[in-house]
Structure formats: C-alpha cells, structure tokens
Amino acid sequence: MHFTVDTMHSGDWTAVRTIYQEGIATKNATFETDAPEWTAWDQGHLSVCRFVLRESGNVTAWAALSPVSKRKIYAGVAEVSIYVAESARGKGFGKILLKILVESSEKAGIWTLQGGIFPENEASIMLHRLCGFRVVGRREGVGKMDGVWRDVVLMERRSKVAGI
C-alpha cells in the first residue's frame, strides 16, 4: 500500500469535497446536508493542520481543524474533522491522519482537540479513543436530522505538551 500525507491545498478541494459528501450521505458523520464551496469551507477552518492522505496519488482521506470559538481564551481549542473515502475505509488511514493531526496541532500551540460524534458512528468513536481522546459526555437531542433529534458524544484530547 503506497500512500503519502500532504498539506491540503485548494487544488485538493474537489476530491476532499467528494469524500465529505460521502460522509454526509451516511447520515452518521455530520449534521451538514451538503458540503460547501471551497471559500466557505476555507474560512471556517484553521489555516494550519489541514491534511490529505493520498493513496497511489489520489486523495482518499482528509483531516482539518476548526475553531470552537472566536474568543481569545479558546484560541488553543479546536474541533476535529476527519473523513475517509468509502473505498479506503478499514485500511488504517483515519488513525494515521488523526495521529498526524494531533502532533501538528500541538506544534501549532493547540492544547485541546474536541470532536462531536454521533453515538452510532462507533468506528469514529473507537478511532478517537485509540488516538488519546476521552468521552466527556453525551449531548442529548442536540440537533435534528430528517426530523429526528440526534445525540452527539463529545470527546476531547488534552495535550500533555501544548498549553502547559
């Protein structure tokens, strides 16, 4: 299996958006119903810690961080987004990317990573646990999807390096 991990650039957006849409289609990855255009996505995510994993030259997974708040006190807290193409799931790419994301976030001074994950998305919960995240709690009925209230498991990882 030949793969590389690179910094995400705007030229990767078509492939990244396709993978994001695949995640949206599962109805267990996000409350979003459609992937935005590049400009909106770019503005909503941190300019650091954006990665794509290429398998045989093709983008098959991506990871990025978004700020949890505009308040200065939360500058070191970010929310994780990580998506793997349907055709590439089960190969360990999510774990590779999440480990790289954790390491690079610490170098960027981010002390807490968090993720809100549907409880039905057991693979994502396990992935985050394997990479040092812990369950903080469960937000019950935090949002509606297709007219049904959905819970979200809140997970976080506190750095032992950044922000100490």
Image: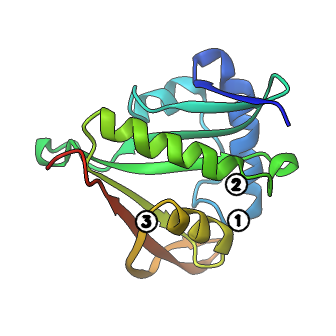
CB under 8 Å between discs 1 and 3: no
Look at mark 3 in the image and give the residue it sits on: 133
Tell me the tag on residue 27. 1
Where's residue 164, x and y in %? 14, 50
Task: Give residue 88's position: percent from left, percent from top.
Answer: 83, 47
Type of the residue with mark 2: Ile
**Element under label 2?**
helix
- For mark 2, what is the residue? 24
Disc 1 and disc 3: Cα gap in Å?
23 Å
Q: Position of residue 130 (x, y in %)?
A: 54, 65
Residue pictured at 17% horizontal, 46% vertical: 163
From the viewer's perspective, tell me whether residue 65 is left or right of residue 29.
left
Instruction: Answer with left or right where residue 9 lies relative to residue 46.
Output: right
Q: Is residue 118 left or right of residue 71?
A: right
Find residue 108 and report its image quarter: top left
Indicate whether 71 appears above or below 120: above
Colour scheme of this structure image? rainbow
In the image, which disc is placed on residue 60? none
Relative to 72, is 140 above or below?
Answer: below
Left or right: 127 in relation to 159: right
- Is residue 134 depicted above or below 132 in this figure? below
Q: Residue at x 57, y 70 (%)?
A: 125
Q: 140 or 116, which lies in front?
A: 116
- Tag 2 near tag 1, CB within 8 Å: yes
- How many numbered marks appear? 3
Which type of secondary structure does the marked residue at label 3 adopt? loop
Disc 3 marks a residue whose amino acid type is Phe
